[in-house]
Amino acid sequence: LMDLIAPYLFVLRPNLLSLIAKRMVDISFQHGFVPESATGFFLHSYTLINIFDNIEEGYRWEKLALVILDRFDAHSRYPKVKFYLTIFAATWKVPFQSSIVELQSCHRELLLVGDIEFAAFSSQRYIKYCIICGKSLIDVEKECAAISMEVSKLNQMNNTLGHMCIHMMVLELIGERSRDPFALYKGPISNCEDLLAYASDNGLFAIMQTTHLCRLVLGFFFERYTEAASMAEQFRQCHKGLHSLNYILHAFF
């Protein structure tokens, strides 16, 4: 049960993850290890990194989570834990260029095991890393469009709302305003403002952060500094203390 609810706590109640982590680790050491123990190990590493600022120890626990999965040959669970490793501890430990390769691999593997939700998350992070590492924005836009079409065919557009906002940012950066990435979405969200309102109403802090960050980047590059400063402050208000890529980009800009 704790293994199942953990991914949703990242979006809805990240402050509860440390409690779940302690309980899962305690149960594993008291009663023995199972594949789900890897989730507890990862969440413990999350606590070490984001609460105690202990990146070295957090990275070690994330590696142990992968060892647990190897021992049990839990191949269906491996891509998700590898994704977690790449977006948290590895952000501080390995070059972003290396993470691009890992995220591409995670996306393919998550699709193969049927985890469409985390495949979408992985693609979002992949696009952000491509932008940071200086990949051609024209090429990045093409990949954004391909990912959107892929998810659309799987009827999983709700899992890629944050990706749409990133795609819109890329389109504006290359001066292409005639295309609308939200057109594939058949729901009530038709632009970034609608997305922000939806995320705010539903307590989706990760999407709120992504939306504010995209608008911050656009404000910065188009010299709308008052707007950029406002987006930076709004990002800070919904920031939940995660030592993640969004946190790094916010601090940079």
Image (cartoon, rainbow, N blue to C red):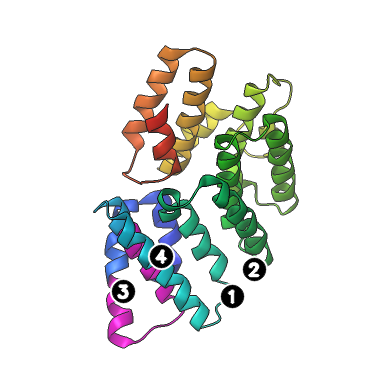
Closer to the camera, 247 or 206? Answer: 247
Q: Is residue 33 magenta?
A: yes
Residue that mark 2 sits on: 113
**How far, Cα to Cα, is label 1 from label 4?**
16 Å
**How far, Cα to Cα, is label 3 from label 2?**
25 Å
Amino acid type shown at disc 1: His
Residue that mark 4 sits on: 62
Horizontal and vertical percent position of residue 245: 45, 42
Closer to the camera, 50 or 152? Answer: 50
Task: Name the N-terminal-most of marks 2 and 1.
Answer: 1
Say which of marks 2 and 4 sits in front. Answer: 4
Amino acid type shown at disc 4: Glu
Amino acid type shown at disc 2: Val
Task: Name the N-terminal-most of marks 2 and 4.
Answer: 4
Q: Which mark is residue 232?
A: none
Q: Residues within 10 Å of mark 4 (few under 14, many from 20)?
A: many
Residue at 37 percent of width and 69 percent of height: 41
Up the image or down, 231 lies above or below 72; here it is above
Q: Secondary structure at mark 3?
A: helix
Up the image or down, 39 lies above or below 15; here it is below
